[in-house]
Amino acid sequence: MGQPNIGKDCDMLNKRAIAALLKENQDEAEDFWEEAMDINPNHFDTKVNYEMYRWKYALISDDQLVDELEEIVFKNQHKGHSLHGIISIALGNKEMGLRILEQFNQQDESRLVEDPSENLRRKKARELAKDIYREAIQKKDDFF
């Protein structure tokens, strides 16, 4: 029997949790997420989805959401940094969120010159963060 693939196991459980949630089976979704977190509490996608789920359904507060995502998610410069900005805006801290997105966009541009082999997922995340930032700056009065 081969070695377990922790990343793929967590990915699979995370996707099962999302599927269960789409079928309105919250208990099953929570079970899948908790199993994934037991395997790897630092799995990025599982951590984001599970904590966002808990926040959406008022199982944790705004402050708890930020605390839960701080170490593993927000410090990830590729995906988490822009997510930090977006979540800050969603939580009502628009100035901080816009500042984070602006920093992310500036860092990301310089990174492209050094590393043109960015994968598609990072590129999409970067484009989404830029779109949100531009929209927020252009339509500030409507956006907030």
Image (cartoon, rainbow, N blue to C red):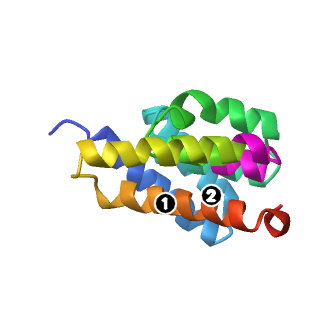
Q: Residue at x 62, y 58 (%)?
A: 133
Q: Is residue 23 above or below residue 52?
A: below
In the shown orientation, is residue 21 left or right of residue 96?
left
Task: Evaluate whether residue 116 shows in this view.
Answer: yes
| Residue 93 is covered by the magenta coloring | yes
Badge 1 element: helix
Q: Which residue is drawn at the image coordinates 55% and 57% (left, top)? A: 129
Crowd class of label 2 (few under 14; some 14 to 19; many from 20; radius 10 Å): many
Label located before the other in sequence (1 or 2):
1
Q: Quadrant of residue 22?
A: bottom right
Q: Are marks 1 and 2 in contact (CB under 8 Å)?
A: no
Q: Position of residue 18 (x, y in %)?
A: 55, 62
- Number of numbered discs on residues: 2
Which segment is the magenta one? 86-96
Query: Against 73, is 71 above or below?
Result: above
Frontmost of labels 1 and 2 is 2
Q: Magenta stretch mostly in which secondary structure?
A: helix
Helix, strand or loop status at disc 2: helix
Residue beneath disc 1? 16
What residue is pinned by disc 2?
A: 133
Report the amino acid beneath label 2.
Answer: Tyr
The quadrant in which the C terminus is found is bottom right
Kind of residue sitting beneath label 1: Arg
Choose between 101 and 64: the one closer to the eye. 101
Residue at x 68% of width, y 69% of height: 24
Q: Residue at x 70, y 60 (%)?
A: 137
Taking depth in this image into account, of 41 and 25 the one nearest to the observer is 41
**Residue 64 image position (x, y, % from top left):** 76, 33
Where residue 103 sits, quadrant-wise, is top right
